[in-house]
Amino acid sequence: MTAAAPAADLDWLATRLGWRPRDAALATRALTHRSAAGADNERLEFLGDAVLSFVVAELLYREFAAAPEGDLSRYRAALVSGEVLADVAEDLDVGSHLRLGPGELRSGGFRRRSILADAFEALLGAVYLDAGLDSARGLVERLWRTRVAALASTPPPKDPKTRLQEWLQARSLGLPAYSVERVSGEPHEQQFEVRCSVAALGASAAGEGSSRRRAEQLAAERVLATLDGGGTAP
Amino acid sequence: MTAAAPAADLDWLATRLGWRPRDAALATRALTHRSAAGADNERLEFLGDAVLSFVVAELLYREFAAAPEGDLSRYRAALVSGEVLADVAEDLDVGSHLRLGPGELRSGGFRRRSILADAFEALLGAVYLDAGLDSARGLVERLWRTRVAALASTPPPKDPKTRLQEWLQARSLGLPAYSVERVSGEPHEQQFEVRCSVAALGASAAGEGSSRRRAEQLAAERVLATLDGGGTAP
């Protein structure tokens, strides 16, 4: 990462992203963290995040024509996580082209991965504005091809309640308990708040949602997030 | 809402949505709740939700060229809330064209608004697949025009911490207290869990996020959600 790269590296953009900007200033902005001088990439990140979610949603809708909505949602959450975005940005070597302020340069690796993830989204937003939806879609399809193919060859992800139960059972830690802590709102628009507790671990987390089931899933997901490895391996 | 409407009402779609489906079965599916027989609208709802978020994000990005990212995010959340979607669906009279199963018919108004909101998203997904992005964008721009114009004539929404503080001060209820309950994750990818407490009300809620500030905002937002009118009026 450099503090004063004067403008975006057009050769790099063409080679690695397949993007030859008509508006080079847009590319420079996409690579400018808010700690640096000049127009920063935060608005482009907002737009690029929306482009990415939409393009991935459509890709999954078409690719997994028989998958229920719940699987599509879980697939998408996995594909556009901050972790994956940071990996994509690192593969592209976005870090070498970022414009950061002196404070961020001093802090070194700190927060580096989330800054990279955000910068990738900003780049995608810039590609969309500059070259159109088909270009942005083509870029995402190319960069995500392997990850989408991997989904097709693995069973659909399990929901958080199931994963938590399996994780606990594999360790003989008993079952989680779910209790409704609060129900609010009009009868036809109720909001549930549920706590998921694992007595053996002294762990608990709350979840909320428009149904008891959704609130339980969110609470289970938050407990999972506190477990070793995020509860990914049973 | 009717249980056995044989197919989508093409005149209604043309008049109210400006959509003349090439694929009438797609329109029927968009209007079929999962409680009814036949292919339901849940996958289309997933796609339509993504289309809506993207179209609204771009609309805001272009319309509010000087707004910081935080304002754009808050504007979007307000524009695509379940409340607004249900209002849009009611204005369009989606309810009269929905296909519901006998169970849902018996339950009457219960859950009706969220079913309407979901059906609108499914219709938007169907318009996108059948007629393309420009048609879907045109529909959203027409249906949201007044709401977007209203944003332009009001000051940007305040962040949740500010709103909570103002709501409490207007009632002489003191200041909220924020405490960090948990910090987890690697140093460069920390996750914060913060509790926001209002002693005078005996109210509290937790929020989590990748920074202390974000976690505090989320916690404040959840406390606000429990107050009269969602704390909208100071």
Image (cartoon, coloured by chain):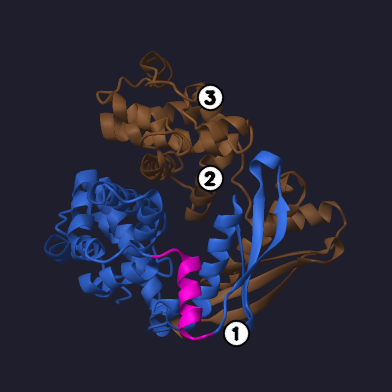
Chain colours: A blue, B brown
Q: CA distance from mark 3 to mark 2?
A: 32 Å
**With B221 as the anchor, is A117 left or right in this view?**
left
Question: Can residue B151 be seen from the camera position used here?
Answer: no
Q: Position of residue B38 (x, y in %)?
A: 37, 34
For label 2, the SS is: helix
Question: Can residue B145 be seen from the camera position used here?
Answer: yes
Q: Position of residue B137 (x, y in %)?
A: 36, 33
- Of B154 and A145, nearer the camera is A145
Which chain is disc 1 placed on? Answer: A
Q: Amino acid at mark 2?
A: Tyr
Residue B129 — which label? none
The quadrant of the image that shows the C terminus of chain A is bottom left
Residue A234 vs A27, above or below: the answer is below
Look at the image and give the residue range highlighted in magenta.
A158-172
- Label 1: which residue? A201
For label 1, the SS is: helix
**With B180 as the anchor, is B67 left or right in this view?**
left
Q: Amino acid at mark 1?
A: Leu
Q: CA distance from mark 2 to mark 1?
A: 40 Å
- Label 3: which residue? B1
- Label 2: which residue? B75
